[in-house]
Amino acid sequence: MDNTLNSDIFKKDNAFIAGLRDGLPIALGYFAVSFSLGIQAKEVGMTAFQAAVMSFTNLTSAGEFGALAIIGTGGSYFSIALSQLIINLRYCLMSFALSQKIKPETPTHHRLLMSYGITDEIFGVSIGQKYPLSPFYTYGALLLTVPGWTAGTAIGVLAGSILPDSVTSALNLALYGMFTAVFIPKSREDLRICAAVITSMIASFAATHLPYIKDVAGGTRIIILTVLISLIFAIIKPIDNEPANETDTDHTNATEQNRQKEEI
Amino acid sequence: MNIWIYIAVMAIVTYLIRMLPMTFLRKEIKNKTLRSFLAYVPYVTLTVMTFPAILDATRSIYSALAGFATALIMSYFKKSMILVALVSCAVVFITELIIIH
């Protein structure tokens, strides 16, 4: 404990570098995904600069895609606000989860900055860190991912129309490939998560095809299914380790995860 | 309708959603069910967003299936996110070269 200052500085550097390292693949993926976002932004009449500002300030794939659909049809500002609230409500849940992953005494300015970086992918790698999550890990991850996302969108506007359909079609799978790489490895480690993932696939498939239910807008469907399935599993299969449940699992998994990263 | 106002509205709503819980929730949650709920949310939501939407993401359901199968297998063997994404895209590209003329 008498070495707190030194060890804190050491941890800060470590966390920042770990964030950079985990951010690099995400940044490359973002670049590919935001490129196709840029193509759509151009179609609704955005300039490259406007599209870049949108991506820099929003940093959300599904939210921006949803917004472009509304902007394209000249929807109201209220409908844009509502669409973002619904499509991005999952970030609220993630923010809630991350608030439990940082030290309770983390100062407000760090919380305000870290919040900006809550995306599916950055959340995915952050939740895999051991407790407590350092704000500098998030900053390291943001340093590469934000420029990747922003530049990809702008370049998509400028160059998108040059690309053949075959390439944009293939790039459309990038985002989903990244999502898969988050929930499948976790399913392999934890049978409860595995059961929840399989249930989610079946329920989501059913909700997309069943009469009446299939008419629910995509963003709303995602929220309803997420809340229902997570709640049911939390009740019937609680993840019930001692107070800091994620801490415990993460400690045991930390070495294994580090080893995996080395392999990559 | 002004594009800059659209962007500002989006940005403010999205930031507030991300910021409010993180900034104002300072205590550890003790409730077991709530903790479990929060542990399930990210994986459930990513799964729901991916499937079955992934099947409509490309020009053909067959190329999408090939890409998804690739992503599932590589993820099972814990390959990195970017490798999974890039190889899956490549598989879609190659499949479409074969099936779309």
Image (cartoon, coloured by chain):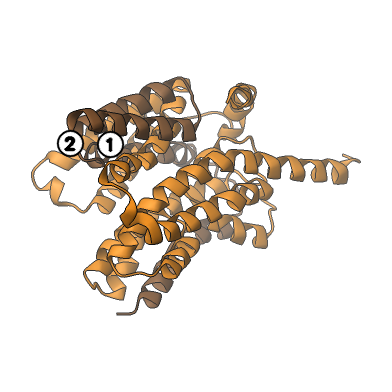
Chain colours: A orange, B brown
In the image, residue B45 lies at what x, y percent? 36, 41
The answer to whether residue B21 shows anywhere in this view is: yes
Residue at image coords 25%, 48%: A221
Q: Residues within 10 Å of mark 1 (few under 14, many from 20)?
A: many
Q: Distance between the residues labelled 2 and 1?
A: 11 Å
Residue at the spot of label 2: A206
Establish if A195 lies above or below A132: above
Label 1 is found on which chain of the structure? Answer: B
In the image, residue A235 lies at what x, y percent? 38, 34
Residue at image coords 56%, 33%: A245
Establish if A248 lies above or below A52: above
Question: Which one is nearer the viewer's eye here, A165 or A239?
Answer: A165
In the image, residue B93 lies at what x, y percent? 30, 34
> Looking at the picture, which amino acid does disc 2 mark?
Ala
Q: Which residue extends farthest left?
A: A211
Q: Which residue extends farthest bottom?
A: B1
Label 2 is found on which chain of the structure? Answer: A
- Residue B18: which numbered mark, if any? none
In the image, residue A184 lies at what x, y percent? 41, 27
Residue at the spot of label 1: B51
The answer to whether residue A187 shows anywhere in this view is: no
**Does dot 1 land on a helix, a strand or a loop?**
loop
